[in-house]
Each structure stands twice: as C-alpha cells, then as structure tokens.
Image (tube, rainbow, N blue to C red):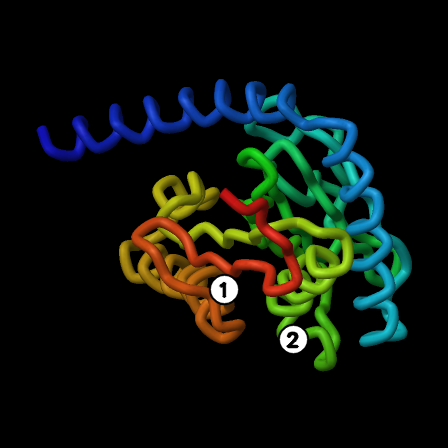
Amino acid sequence: MGIILNLLADMARGFYRKREVAYLRGKITSRHEAWIGELLNDIGWKIKDTSPSFSAIRQSYCRSVGYGDLDIGANGQRAFCSEAPIIFSVYLGGFPAFMLGGEFRGDVFCIRQLQGALGVAIPPELKHWPRLLVEACMESAEQYGIPEIRLYRAHQTLFYRMPVFEGPPQAISAYRQRMRRRYDGTARQLGFTMKRDWGEWKNPAYERPSV
C-alpha cells in the first residue's frame, strides 16, 4: 500500500511540475531574456577557457517536462530530459555533454537541473562542470544585477524521486548519492546558504531598493 501511495504522489508531483514549467515559461520577461542571452555567452566563454574540447553552447526554452526540441547525443538518442523552462546545453566534440536548466521566480534565478549526457567522455579539466556552470551564473549575476541565485537541492528534482533507469536498490541509492554531491555539494562548495529545499547566494553587488 505504501509503494502505491508513493507512486501516486510521484505522479501527482510530475503532473504539477509540468503545469509549473508552462506557467514559469510564460512569466519570463524581456529583461530576463536579455540576461539569458548574456548568460549564454558567459557560460560559453567559461567552458571554452577551461577546455579545448568545447565546441558550442545552445539555449532553448521548454513549456513542459520532457525531451521537447532538445539535443541528440553521441549515442543517437536525445541527450537531456528537461524539467525547467530555460535550458543551456554545452557541447563537447560536437555532441551535447551537459546542461543547466533554470527558471525565474520574480528576479531570482533558480537552477533546477545540472544534467550530464550519456556517451560523452568528460575531459579531466571539466570534471567539476557543475561548479563551473553555477560559477558562471554567479559571475554573470554580479555583472548584470541579478539579485540572487538559488540552486535547488537534489531531492527537489523529479529525477531524484523517479530515476530515468531501472535497477536494483543499491544502484538507485548510488545514483541519488551522486545527485546530492552534484546539487547539494556544489552549493556548499560555493558558499551558498543552505535551506531545506535549496541553497541560496545573494549577489553582494546588487543594490536593493531602500524601504
């Protein structure tokens, strides 16, 4: 009975997230879009300066959870399953290798996804690619006046609750541990203040309106 209730809860969570992604896509303003364009360039330059394997970066929008109009990976399958309205896909050697998915809550930029693609060898200098992506967001936010960056914790992602593969319990446990290192660990390494559902970084260069 408990398994069935958990399954129903996960299905409801997935349905709600699909509606939420569509809603948040519709709330993106022209000011947000301008910064998204700057962030695209900032991420691209950061990865390019780190590795000669960098070949391209692509930005796309999604209105639901799923593959949508996303990239074909080195294994011939679609590389990423999105659960965020704003996607940045980084290519190495001509193939999508990893991505950052995010959304705006007001003027706060929230990172929902840090996902790698199957079948792409990550060079040693990009071993810590999640950190590089988040750092690029922080640096761009300081330059362009975004007040805050949030990095959602691993347990807030749909794929933590519903892994995209079938396997024994120990394999799923190891998968979730890797996700906690990628999300929660990256936030802690970069000095984010840890909340129950996310880590937050407030832009020290942002001039908040006086009350």
SS under mark 2: loop
Instruction: Judge the density around disc 2: few (<14), some (14-19), many (≥20) Cα neighbours within 10 Å.
Output: few
Vertical placement of 104 versus 154: above or below?
Answer: above
Which quarter of the picture shows residue 199?
A: bottom left
Q: Which of the pair 54/205 is nearer the observer? A: 205
User: Mark 2 or mark 1: which comes first in sequence?
Assistant: 2
Side (left or right) of 128 relative to 16: right
- Which residue is denoted by mark 2 in the rendering? 127
Q: Residue at x 81, y 67 (%)?
A: 46
**Callout count:** 2
Judge whether residue 83 can be spotted in this image: no
How much space separates mark 2 and mark 1, taking CA atoms? 11 Å
Instruction: Judge the density around disc 1: few (<14), some (14-19), many (≥20) Cα neighbours within 10 Å.
Output: many
The kind of residue tagged 1 is Arg
- Which residue is denoted by mark 1 in the rendering? 182
Q: Residue at x 71, y 27 (%)?
A: 29
Q: Residue at x 66, y 66 (%)?
A: 135
Residue 114 on image: x %, y %: 58, 54
Furthest-front residue in this view:
211
Q: Which of the pair 204/183 is nearer the observer? A: 204
Residue 57 on image: x %, y %: 84, 51
Q: Residue at x 49, y 18 (%)?
A: 19
Vertical placement of 98 versus 190: above or below?
Answer: above
Side (left or right) of 39 relative to 64: right
Furthest-bottom residue in this view:
124
Residue 83 on image: x %, y %: 55, 35
Vertical placement of 100 versus 44: above or below?
Answer: above
SS under mark 1: helix
> Circles 2 and 1: CB distance less than 8 Å?
no
Side (left or right) of 30 relative to 86: right
The kind of residue tagged 2 is Lys
